Image (tube, helix red, strand yellow):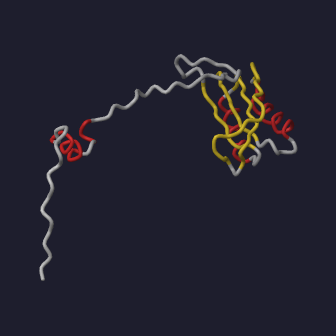
Amino acid sequence: MRKYEVMYILNPEANNLNELEGRLHKILEANGGGIEEHGKWGIRTLEYPIKKKTKGYYGVLIVNTTSENIDEFVRISHIEQDVLRILVINTEKEKGYIQSTVYAKTEVKNDKPDRERKPGNKRPDYYRRNEQRVEGEEPKATKPVEAKE
């Protein structure tokens, strides 16, 4: 038996949402497996459409089960049309992984520093013209082009 964290996104418009969730849980509980924690995140708006759906029902499980049960869970999830996405993580292999079924609302910081302007990106002829001009001095006029007759 290994410890896994399983996340799934179901179609919220499905008629048998609780029944589908129960079937998925029974697959993981087969052959002596057990669900330690079950987190229901509810219906959330997706960042991008998945199978032409813009909302999804999120569920998170922490389970002790066999790899055969996980394989069967993945197989059934791909067959079932109301399962939009799944994610299975073997938490024993992940170093420093903290298991939690609680939805964490954290602020995302922008770690990128503000870009500084490079002097090479400016139009050099524009600045040279301004540097050559002395205050109070009129710009030099150019000769008009004479038309040939």
Q: Is residue 53 left or right of 113 when viewed as pictured?
A: right
Residue drawn where x is 71% and y is 21% of the image: 102
Counting every numbered tag in the picture gives 0
Q: Is residue 86 left or right of 93 when viewed as pictured?
A: right
**Residue 67 % position (x, y):** 65, 30
Pick whichever, 146 or 102, lies toward us: 146
Q: Is residue 38 left or right of 106 when viewed as pictured?
A: right
Q: Is residue 67 above or below residue 96?
A: below
Residue drawn where x is 59% and y is 23% of the image: 107
Residue drawn where x is 81% and y is 35% of the image: 21
Residue 36 figure quarter:
top right
Q: Is residue 104 left or right of 118 when viewed as pictured?
A: right
Pick whichever, 84 or 67, lies toward us: 84
Pick whichever, 84 or 116, lies toward us: 116
**Residue 104 % position (x, y):** 66, 22
**Residue 99 % position (x, y):** 64, 19
Residue 46 figure quarter:
top right
